[in-house]
Image (spheres, grey):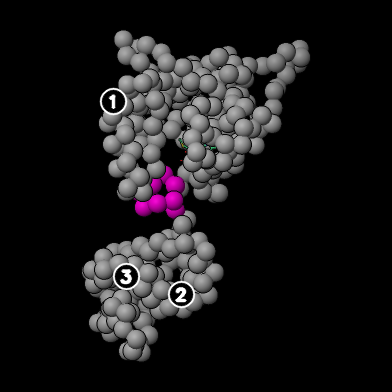
């Protein structure tokens, strides 16, 4: 899904159109008016209200409204940049200065899609270092472990674009086998509530991040989680999850199954139950089971 963002110059507001990626070429090669019309005609009445509120010139607005109402006879009217401009259409900007390209977003509610940007450089893959005596040095030896309020060892991990899927969690330093890496945090809710929420998130197009602790309890990280929710699945993972009792309450801890080197993506086995509606696995491991579920 691509999003073209139209910004009015008269008012400081944005109008966001969603469109299918298949239409990308079409949009790139069309003039501004065609883009707006194509987008507007593919949307419902809500678009009319949205366009109205943007403060476009009356001629241009009339033209758009005719298109929206399906009129066959059009008033010929060329919008100018006084009215609106399109982020991503460099040819159309008279100054020749485009602010950005087309924004690629998964959906309107995903505030963290920028984490998958190609421009965010992942940590460099470290190699095992040996000191002058030939012993392997351990980057953790002199390090003070510091747990922040989200139960994360600070500077352990970072979210970057993943080769497996969207965003993933990466090691910022070497992590030893058996070490606790991060807690999967979020709202602790009952199983029944998680079902209702899942339906709601699906309906609203919000990606759902949940981790089941047991039959009755689920941790919902969708709105209140930390970066652990970006950990992808692998059929041959370097991490595992465990439930630990902390002050009498169950917590999900992600720990390293083996030594994980700086720059490696952290993964665990989601252990999804088998379902008919299959999700293809892209973990690329030798032991890949082809599907997540
Ligand atoms: C908790 S999210 C992981 C973070 C996700 N990459 C993101 O950017 O939001 C889980 C979803 O990521 C996708 N995913 C994770 N691991 C995958 C894999 N090995 N192959 C394909 N898709 C995967 C699936 O769509 C899954 O439902």
**Residue at left offset 47%, top offset 66%:** 88
Kind of element beneath mark 3: strand
Residue beneath disc 2 = 93
Q: Nearer the viewer, residue 219 or 121?
A: 219
Q: Is residue 176 magenta?
A: no
Q: Earlier in the sequence, mark 1 or mark 2?
A: 2
Q: Which mark is residue 252?
A: none
Label 1 C-beta lies within 8 Å of the nearest ligand 1 atom: no
Residue 42 at x, y percent in the picture:
37, 69
Q: Residues within 10 Å of mark 2 (few under 14, many from 20)?
A: some
Kind of element beneath mark 1: strand
- Which segment did they paint magenta? 105-113
Q: Which mark is residue 8?
A: 3
Label 2 C-beta lies within 8 Å of the nearest ligand 1 atom: no
Q: Nearer the viewer, residue 79 or 50?
A: 50
Residues tagged 1 and 3 counted as in contact (Cβ below 8 A): no
| Apparent side of residue 264 relative to residue 277 in the rendered image (left or right) | right
Q: Residues within 10 Å of mark 3 (few under 14, many from 20)?
A: some
Q: Earlier in the sequence, mark 2 or mark 3?
A: 3
Q: Which mark is residue 190?
A: 1
Residue 140 at x, y percent in the picture:
57, 17
Is residue 42 visible in the rendered image? The answer is yes
| Apparent side of residue 136 relative to residue 281 in the rendered image (left or right) | right
**Residue at left offset 64%, top offset 32%:** 288
């Amino acid at each position: 899904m691509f999003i073209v963002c139209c910004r009015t110059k008269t008012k400081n507001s944005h109008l966001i159109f969603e469109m299918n990626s298949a239409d990308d070429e079409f949009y790139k090669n069309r003039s501004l008016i065609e883009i707006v019309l194509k987008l507007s005609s593919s949307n419902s009445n809500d678009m009319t209200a949205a366009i109205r509120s943007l403060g476009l010139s009356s001629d241009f607005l009339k033209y758009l409204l005719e298109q929206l109402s399906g009129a066959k006879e059009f008033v010929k009217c060329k919008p100018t940049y006084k009215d609106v401009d399109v982020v991503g259409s460099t040819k159309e900007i008279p100054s020749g200065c485009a602010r950005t390209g087309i924004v690629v977003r998964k959906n309107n509610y995903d505030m963290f899609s920028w984490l998958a940007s190609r421009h965010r450089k992942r940590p460099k893959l470290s190699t095992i270092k040996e000191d002058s005596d030939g012993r392997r040095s351990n980057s953790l030896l002199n390090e003070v472990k510091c747990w922040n309020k989200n139960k994360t060892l600070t500077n352990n991990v970072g979210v970057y674009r993943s080769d497996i899927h969207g965003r993933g969690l990466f090691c910022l330093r070497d992590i030893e086998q058996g070490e606790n890496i991060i807690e999967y945090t979020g709202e602790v809710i009952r199983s029944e509530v998680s079902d209702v929420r899942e339906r709601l998130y699906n309906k609203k197009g919000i990606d759902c991040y949940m981790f089941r602790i047991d039959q009755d309890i689920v941790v919902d990280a969708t709105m209140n989680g930390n970066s652990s929710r970006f950990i992808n699945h692998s059929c041959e993972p370097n991490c595992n999850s465990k439930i630990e009792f902390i002050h009498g309450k169950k917590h999900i801890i992600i720990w390293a199954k083996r030594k994980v080197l700086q720059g490696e993506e952290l993964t665990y086995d989601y252990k999804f139950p088998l379902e008919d509606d299959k999700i293809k696995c892209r973990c690329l491991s030798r032991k890949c089971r082809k599907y997540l579920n």
